[in-house]
Structures are given as C-alpha cells and as structure tokens.
Image: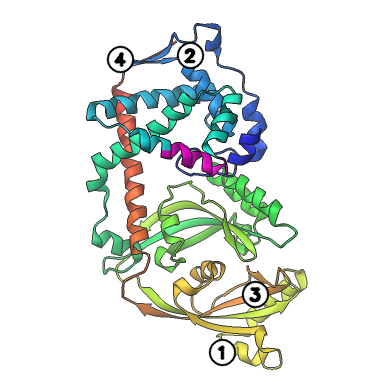
C-alpha cells in the first residue's frame, strides 16, 4: 500500500495512468491470473515468433497492482503484453534498443515520481513479488518505443511555420478553436486538501456524461447549469501556459487539475477546429475587477446579478466604487502572459463588456465581479511558439504511433492459451 499512496497522484505522466483513489480497492481485489496453475514459463500467448509466458503475465499484473494503475485486469494485461511484443519486433527489425544508461535513468526518474530512491522503489516492489527485471523491461520498452517512433516519424510530425501560426491564431488562414467543458472547484484553506483529492478523481473520469455530471455536482462556475459545457474558444485567447496543454488533448481527454489562487480547474476536450481567416491575437487585455464582500453567498450573487444589469461598460464601475476604498475596484491592462491564470481563463470566455462572477478573492471572502474592457490586437510573435510547436509534434507522434500499433496488430498471428 505504500507504493500506491505515493503513485496514485500521478496522472498521464506518459508512463502510467493511475486509478482514482476510490477505485484502488477494486483493483487490488483482482484475482490472480489463471495461468498460475500451469508452468510459469510455458507460453500463455504467441505473438508471431515470440511468446509471452504465464510468469510475465503475473509479474505485469502484480506490478500494476502495486502502483495502483489502470489496466490491471487479466484481459488488459494480456493486450498490453501483446502490444509489447509487437513493438519489440518492430524495434528489433529497425535495430533500435535503449542503452543500459538510458534505462537506468528512466528507472531513477520513475522512482523519483514517488519521492523514492531507486533502491527504495525496487525494494518495495520486490517485497510485493515484482522482480527487478520486470521493471527494467517495462521502462526499456517505453524508452525504446519513444526513440523508434521519433526516428521513424519525427520529420513528418513536425508542424510547419504556417501550422504553428494557425494554432496561435497569427495567420490570415485562421487559428484554432477548442470546444471545452470545465469544472471549477472553489477552495479555501480548510477545503483545499479535500478538493485536491476530488479533482484527482475527476481527472480519471471517462466519457462526456461522467464529466458533465461532475460539473453539475461540484463546479462553482456558472457553466455548472449546463454540465460545464463552454462555447468555442480561440486557443490564442487562453493563458499562454495553458495553450499547449489544451492542444495536446484528444477528444474526451481531461486535463490534470490546474491550481488557481482560490480554485482548482479541470477541462475536458470536446472538439478542435480551424477558424475562419483573420482570427487575431492580443498584446494587451484591459479588464476590471470589482470586489463584493460576502463571497459566493446568495445575497452577494444576487447583488452581482443586479449590478450586471445596471452597467454597460467598465467605466461605469468607477461611479459605483468612488466612495469605497481604492482596493475595491481594480482596473488592469496587461499582456496575456502577465494576467493571473484564473483571471485569464475567465477573460477568454468573455466578449467586450461581458461579466464573470466565477472567481473569489481574500480566501473566498469576496466575490470578484470581473469585466472585460478592451483587447489590443497584436500580430507579433507569441512567446509560447516553441511550446505550441512541441505540443503539436507530440500529438502527431502519438497518433502515428497508435496507428502503427493498430496496423501491427492487424497483421500479426496471435494465439492465446
């Protein structure tokens, strides 16, 4: 259980996808593979000219169980090891193999994710019945496959300058828009630990309906009434640090929990499309925050709703705030990279002179009446260009790898015992 407590906080790290804490008990309750009644080293599966033994099946399942990882049922373990063999056959033919030094670094990094030394990590696994060689083979396969896919497909996966421009909304041929759903979980000092656990469980949900139900139940944003569903958003309007995160998602994928000043945010991808020509990017965003006492109380939310009906522009807020302390009204003009992430996320959803009341301040004691004043158009380079290029490349490499593996499966002679 010590390994599980350390490793269940991982999510989409590129090695394993952990289960939500509530599901760990179910994973651990799995019965041993049926092959233990047979000779451990007899063939359980034949994949072309290679075999998978019952020993390997049991080792992989025990390894995944100890890490609290998904994919630990017998059927899933069988498929994973079939895929391992197919990958190894392709890599063997290409002459690609990870070096011992690279494998050791990979194991060290794996252990470090659980805040363990390599010796501690391997010792805990050994106590659970998992051999060192099982860990080594798992890491070696991941590293070698990454190198193989990169060597085979990198040249065709790299985006062109025009494709990067489109992703950033900087070309006359248009930009990209994402169709997202959101969950914004308000937090304060008393609830942050509980909210983090909840957010981690939500990040492991599968399917649009499950995410929508969670948004309705847990989100503090106005979109909770619509299952968290947002309208199409320009990628270039999102906070620069979030753009490559969103671009790396496939339909149905959920981001890892994003920590905001007074909330935790999660997003699910529902669609990506290219926009019409002329979608701009912006160098400066002018916005106002009018702080209302009372947090998200019913009385304060009602006051914010009345205020929204009374004003037309950001300038109208000055008349309301003239008799209050200066900190009640904040008027800011900043570049997208300078705007706090929680504020930038809300501004991305707004048109000019529209208002959001999702955010709070002062540890939840004030309600932030956030209003978008103006956006200053910018046709220059965006600071996240390299990040977006890398995200597009990785997205394509993943798709090409999945397609190749599917082809290898279709062509393989697989016999299961």
Q: Position of residue 209 (x, y in %)?
A: 57, 45
Label 3 Cα neighbours within 10 Å, binned few <14 / some 14-19 / many ≥20: many
Secondary structure at badge 3 equals: strand
Number of numbered discs overlaid on the protein picture: 4
The answer for how far apart the CA atoms under marks 3 and 4 are is: 64 Å
- Taking the magenta stretch, the answer to whether it contains residue 115 is yes
The quarter in which the N terminus is drawn is: top right
Mark identifier at residue 54: 2
Q: Which mark is residue 149?
A: none
Please identify the quarter of the rendering in which residue 7 is found: top right
Of labels 4 and 2, earlier in sequence is 4
For this view, does 391 lie left or right of residue 365?
left
Tag 2–tag 1 contact (CB < 8 Å): no
Label 2 crowd (10 A; few <14 / some 14-19 / many >=20)? many
3 or 4: tag closer to the N-terminus: 4
Answer above or below: position of 316 versus 7. below
Q: Could you tell me if the residues under marks 1 and 3 are in contact, i.e. CB atoms within 8 Å?
A: no
State the residue position of label 4.
49
Find out whether the residues at labels 4 and 1 contact each other: C-beta distance under 8 Å.
Answer: no
Q: Residue at x 56, y 78 (%)?
A: 371
Side (left or right) of 110 relative to 47: right
Q: What residue appears at the point 45 percent right and 42 percent down from the top-left corner?
A: 14
Q: Nearer the viewer, residue 163 or 228?
A: 163
Q: Which residues are magenta?
A: 105-116
Which comes before the other along the chain, label 3 or label 2?
2
Q: Which residue is mark 3?
A: 368
Percent x, y of residue 129: 58, 21
Task: Work out how far the residue at label 1 is from the one at label 3, CA to CA, in angstroms.
Answer: 16 Å
């Amino acid at each position: 259980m010590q390994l599980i407590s350390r490793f269940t906080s991982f999510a989409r790290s590129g090695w394993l996808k952990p289960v939500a804490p509530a599901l760990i008990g179910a994973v651990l309750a799995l019965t041993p593979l049926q092959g233990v009644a047979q000779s451990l080293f007899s063939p359980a599966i034949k994949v072309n000219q290679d075999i998978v033994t019952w020993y390997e099946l049991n080792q992989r399942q025990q390894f995944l169980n100890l890490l609290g990882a998904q994919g630990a049922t017998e059927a899933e373990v069988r498929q994973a090891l079939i895929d391992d063999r197919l990958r190894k056959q392709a890599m063997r033919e290409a002459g690609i193999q990870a070096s011992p030094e690279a494998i050791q670094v990979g194991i060290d990094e794996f252990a470090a994710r659980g805040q363990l030394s390599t010796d501690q990590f391997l010792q805990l696994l050994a106590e659970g019945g998992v051999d060192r060689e099982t860990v080594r083979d798992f890491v070696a396969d991941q590293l070698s496959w990454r190198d193989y896919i990169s060597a085979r497909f990198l040249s065709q996966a790299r985006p062109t300058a025009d494709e990067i421009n489109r992703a950033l909304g900087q070309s006359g041929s248009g930009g990209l828009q994402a169709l997202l759903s959101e969950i914004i979980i308000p937090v304060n000092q008393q609830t942050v630990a509980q909210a983090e656990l909840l957010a981690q469980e939500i990040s492991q949900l599968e399917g649009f309906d499950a995410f929508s139900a969670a948004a309705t139940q847990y989100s503090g944003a106005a979109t909770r009434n619509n299952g968290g569903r947002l309208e199409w958003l320009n990628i270039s309007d999102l906070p620069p640090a979030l753009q490559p995160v969103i671009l790396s998602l496939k339909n149905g994928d959920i981001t890892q929990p994003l920590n905001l000043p007074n909330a935790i945010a999660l997003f699910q991808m529902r669609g990506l499309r290219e926009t019409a020509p002329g979608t701009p990017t912006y160098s400066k965003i002018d916005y106002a925050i009018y702080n209302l006492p009372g947090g998200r109380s019913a009385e304060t939310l009602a006051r914010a709703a009345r205020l929204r009906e009374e004003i037309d522009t950001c300038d109208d807020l000055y008349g309301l705030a003239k008799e209050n302390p200066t900190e009640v009204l904040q008027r800011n003009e900043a570049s997208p990279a300078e705007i706090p992430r929680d504020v930038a996320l809300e501004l991305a959803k707004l048109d000019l002179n529209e208002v959001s009341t999702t955010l709070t301040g002062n540890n939840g004691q004030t309600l932030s009446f956030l209003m978008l004043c103006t956006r200053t158009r910018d046709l220059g380079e965006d600071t996240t260009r390299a990040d977006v290029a890398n995200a597009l490349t990785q997205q394509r490499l993943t798709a090409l790898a999945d397609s190749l593996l599917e082809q290898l499966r279709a062509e393989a002679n697989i016999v299961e015992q």
